[in-house]
Image: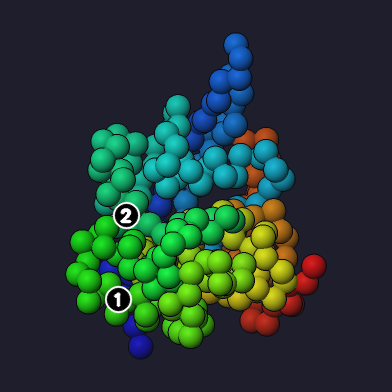
Amino acid sequence: MSAPTTKGHKLGSVALEAKGIVKRFKTGKTHIEVLKGVDFDARHGDVTMVMGPSGSGKSTLVAALSGLLKPEEGKVAALEAKDLWKWSSGRIDRFRLDHCGFIFQGFNLFPALTAKQQVMTALKYQGVSGAEAERRALTALEEVGLASKVNQRPSELSGGEKQRVAIARALAKNPDLIFADEPTSALDGENGQVVIRLLRRAATEHGAAVICVTHDPRLEAYADRVIHIEDGRILDDVRRTPDANPAPLTH
């Protein structure tokens, strides 16, 4: 059987490559350099963990890679974008909509919408018809184990269930790139394990390049690659084989 692909991309092929990323923030009369010439790449089918202490620059790096925060220097090539930051803001927005899935620590769900509506809304912005959006939403929610919760609103869901809705919303778009920023930090061990296993499957079965920012060393067990960043520089970059039976996440 041939390797899974995402929109024709083979597992192991480069999905994103960044060179010389520099990001500064102004504080008063001074500038703080948060990223100091970072090089980075990510491949289809891989879970890449970007790890480091608070303030290390890991979330800023992901924002620069995903078209959310423009760096002062450097180049980001992603999929068909040879240099993402040379595109117009509207074209970058469309790139994120069509190719990227985002999963955040705070879930980012609409309080008034059901789980099914949360997922359908993202698809409708892409131009997917109502019937097809509903079909894909239900499929994605079933995949993350929420088939019985499709009509419940965030106030009726646990933290782990909310994060699974966010993952379903990302997966339903069949994204080439998934960016997850501390996706397990607000969850207990059991729910955190469910979430990271779903991200692992998004890479292995959907062929997405999954880039996960975390400070939790227990998540290394699920990674194909672990990059440690500190003080705006990459300290080490190690490829590894994901553990077949990782130890449970416990707090």
Disc number placed over residue 122 in the picture, else none: none
Amino acid type indicated by mark 1: Glu
Is 69 on the left-hand or right-hand side of 32? left
The image's colour scheme reads: rainbow
Q: Residue at x 22, y 76 (%)?
A: 131
Q: Residue at x 48, y 43 (%)?
A: 63
User: Badge 2, how many Cα within 10 Å: few under 14, some, many 20+?
Assistant: some
Q: Secondary structure at mark 1?
A: helix
Q: How far apart are labels 1 and 2 at the CA level?
A: 18 Å
Amino acid type indicated by mark 2: Leu
Q: Which residue is mark 2?
A: 97
Is 13 on the left-hand or right-hand side of 124? right
Q: Which residue is mark 1?
A: 134
Q: Give the label, 1 or 2, closer to the camera.
A: 1
Residue 12 showing in the rendered view: no
Give residue 15's quadrant in the image: bottom left
Q: Nearer the viewer, residue 129 or 181?
A: 129
Residue furthest top in the image: 29
Q: Nearer the viewer, residue 155 or 108?
A: 155
Q: Residue at x 21, y 61 (%)?
A: 127
Q: Residue at x 30, y 43 (%)?
A: 92
Q: Position of residue 143 (x, y in %)?
A: 45, 81
Give residue 8's quadrant in the image: bottom left
Give the quadrant of the N terminus: bottom left
Question: Number of numbered discs present?
Answer: 2
